[in-house]
């Protein structure tokens, strides 16, 4: 009997030792799992803040002010939701810009790409055909082609320095009085516009200036049926001109 009792006591001891070791092991395991969970749910660092626009007095095209950062541009809602509610922006630094239908967002010039330039435009997807089309941007209640160009500033922050707009040349007569209301009287000159066939036409040119920016409206642009409207940020536009001049000088050495 004594041996049997001793045997039972030994079994109990072994059982308690095993359960105690198991409890300790699984407690440690649970603690490690909890630590892992804490590591997993660790909040991501806040998004890096972009310095404010150094040129707050620059001209704007709708809600898009010259000098705004690329990050701000991408966060700014499309201004004509009543016309294209589903419009969205695509930029040349996004893989999506290489897809069919987004050609307007592409930079086809190696010179532009080497300068660090980024180009953006707005698009919409047709609900019936699923095809992608340019959305443009409203100008005096008319939707016209509009492209946005960014260049890195001294802190390497891409900033909006050039807005290119084009539309029917017939709009200019009605557009100028509206722009005078918004910006005051422009400098007005007339230049000779010549087509590929050699035909020459008088083209009105209107220029509005501010300390940091300029708006230039030309009656005739790439064709005499299309006007050319350009918003430029002077400091970065001058920087871009220097980049082009340097690249041209390098190219001239290879002639």
Image (tube, rainbow, N blue to C red):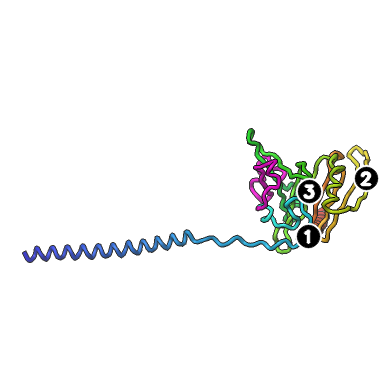
Residue sticking out furthest to the front: 181
Q: Is residue 85 above or below residue 215?
A: above
Give the alpha-carbon distance from disc 3 to disc 2, as whole Å: 21 Å
* Marking on residue 192: 2
Near mark 2 (Cα within 10 A), the count class, few <14, some 14-19 or many ≥20, is: few
Q: Which residue is mark 1?
A: 57
Residue 110 position, x and y percent, is 74, 50
Q: What range is drawn magenta here?
A: 75-104
Q: Is residue 246 visible?
A: no
Label whose residue precedes the other's in the sequence (3 or 1)? 1
Residue 184 versus residue 19: which sits nearer the camera? 184
Relative placement, left or right, of 140 versus 100 is: right
User: Residue shown at 79%/44% (left/top)?
Assistant: 140
| Residue 83 picture quarter | top right
Residue 132 position, x and y percent, is 67, 39
Give the alpha-carbon distance from disc 1 to disc 2, as whole Å: 32 Å
Residue 13 versus residue 165: which sits nearer the camera? 165
User: Residue shown at 78%/45% (left/top)?
Assistant: 139
Q: Which residue is mark 3?
A: 164
Q: Is residue 205 above or below residue 246?
A: above
User: Residue shown at 75%/44% (left/top)?
Assistant: 138
Secondary structure, magenta segment, majority class:
loop
Residue 9 position, x and y percent, is 14, 65
Q: Is residue 189 magenta?
A: no
């Amino acid at each position: 009997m004594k041996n049997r009792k001793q045997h039972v006591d030994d079994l109990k001891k072994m059982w308690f030792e095993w359960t105690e070791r198991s409890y300790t092991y699984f407690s440690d395991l649970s603690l490690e799992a909890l630590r892992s969970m804490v590591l997993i749910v660790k909040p991501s660092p806040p998004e890096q803040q972009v310095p404010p626009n150094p040129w707050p007095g620059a001209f704007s095209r709708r809600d898009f002010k010259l000098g705004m950062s690329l990050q701000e541009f991408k966060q700014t809602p499309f201004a004509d939701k009543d016309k294209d509610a589903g419009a969205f922006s695509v930029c040349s630094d996004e893989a999506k810009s290489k897809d069919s239908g987004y050609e307007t967002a592409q930079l086809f010039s190696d010179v532009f790409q080497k300068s660090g330039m980024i180009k953006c435009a707005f698009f919409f997807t047709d609900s019936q055909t699923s095809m992608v089309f340019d959305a443009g941007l409203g100008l005096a209640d008319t939707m016209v082609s509009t492209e946005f160009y960014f260049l890195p500033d001294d802190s390497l922050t891409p900033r909006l320095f050039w807005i290119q707009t084009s539309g029917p040349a017939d709009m200019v007569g009605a557009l100028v009085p509206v722009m005078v209301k918004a910006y005051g009287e422009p400098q007005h000159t007339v230049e000779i516009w010549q087509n590929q066939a050699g035909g020459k036409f008088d083209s009105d040119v209107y220029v509005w200036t501010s300390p940091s920016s300029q708006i230039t409206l030309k009656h005739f642009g790439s064709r005499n049926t299309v006007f050319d409207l350009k918003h430029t940020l002077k400091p970065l536009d001058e920087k871009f001109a220097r980049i082009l001049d340097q690249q041209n000088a390098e190219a001239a050495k290879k002639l």
